[in-house]
Image (spheres, rainbow, N blue to C red):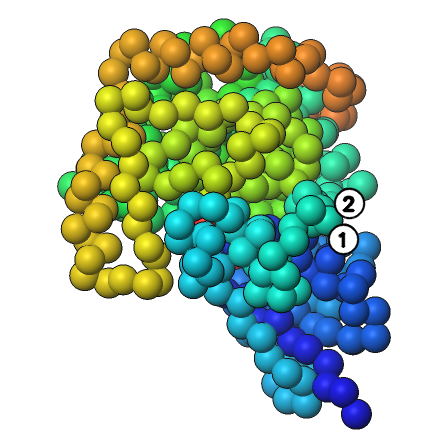
Amino acid sequence: MIKSTTFLLSGGAGRIICAIPALEKYQRLNPDDNFKILISGWESLLWSHPTLQKRTFSITQKGHFDLIKDTNIVSPEPYYVHGYYNQTLSMAEAFDEIINNTTDHSDLPNPKLYVNEYEKLKIRETINAYKMQTGKKKVLVFQPYGSATELINGTVIDYTNRSLRQEDYYNIVRQLSNDFLIIYFGEQRFKYPQDCTSISIDHSHDLRIWMALISECDYFLGVDSVGQHMTRALNKKGLVIMGSTFEKNISYPDYFKFYRNKNKSPTYVPIRLVDFDGMFLNRENDSIMNFDDTQISEIVKIVKNDNSITNSKIGTVIPKGTESMGMKETIVSRMDEEKTMNKNLNTNTISYD
């Protein structure tokens, strides 16, 4: 009897999204393989997927070994694929090369995430309340930091050089605040103390909530982290601010707009292939995500002039009882209610990439 397969996926949430196209392709090409997907975190990203949800399990789930012990385990690692570490393949294509044993990626679908009707309605209700309180019609989700961000002596720093400086992200928020209702996608401890403009979302560790928010927004602005992968998988447009990583590897060059520091070129860091050398390579990328006032103005101009941004089509009905509530109280009450009604919402700790 031919054994079925278990795909063991590790790493950050962005990697999981990048693996989805290859898994969908595998399912199409191998209809007799009752394969399973075992994820070390982020399994909720595949909730509501029409075919992969039932195949997906968490590595923390009790008894999962009994589900996989008679299967062949495949642990795909895109960082080890020659085309990936030479910047000729995307992460999705590298997964395809491993999972489907092919170099033909012409039939690889775009990544897709699915938000159910309940999640859409609850987030839409919250967004409408904010719109009515602020008078803003367009919603922008802004993710200024990647998963390697740290707070050291009051300063936000990312040793992998993929995150914005606090003052740069704040200047962007300040210049866009007249045009957009801005939702801050990140941990509260990293938020600029003077930023009283962007909206912070409670339960921000829940990626299902961020999927729903992005599905209902007008535009995404962010760095190389999970937000841009969600945005592509939900068919929303955006601008990705690039630092030490490469568009071909980790993003969607035929879909997004990009902005780079014109004064510095990135050096590729072969993650998971080097240890000590990686530290030296990261040093070569130091300050690549530092932008002057002119560059910040260019980023803002690109967002404001992007003709893919249209007035929101989301309804404007105010949820009963929220007309006089403050912004924080509104979001807390809506999300707490959702937590109570849906006890299976994901509560993974943040490590987005």
Q: Which residue is mark 1?
A: 48
Label 2 with label 1: CB-CB less than 8 Å: yes
Position of residue 57 relative to residue 291, above or below, is below
Residue 172: which numbered mark, if any?
A: none
Q: Residue furthest bottom?
A: 1
Q: What residue do we see at 45% from left, 9% from top?
A: 301
Relative to 332, say whether 101 is above or below: below
What residue appears at the point 46 percent right and 25 percent down from the top-left corner? Answer: 258
Residue 296 vs residue 195, the one in the foreground: 296
Q: Is residue 239 above or below residue 132?
A: below
**Quadrant in the picture for the N terminus:** bottom right
* Residue 271 in view in this figure: yes
Going by the image, does 256 lie left or right of 161? Answer: right
- The one of 120 and 306 positioned closer to us in this rendering: 306
- The residue drawn where x is 21% and y is 48% is 281
Q: Position of residue 130 (x, y in %)?
A: 61, 21
Q: Who is closer to the viewer here, 170 or 72?
A: 72
Toward the front, the furthest residue is 103
Q: Secondary structure at mark 1?
A: loop
Q: Which residue is mark 2?
A: 116
Q: In x, y percent, where is residue 245?
A: 37, 41
Residue 120 on image: x %, y %: 74, 37
- The residue type indicated by label 1 comes to Ser
Query: SS at mark 2?
Result: loop
* First in residue order: circle 2 vs circle 1: 1
Residue at 70 percent across and 16 percent down: it is 312
Q: Amino acid at mark 2?
A: Asn
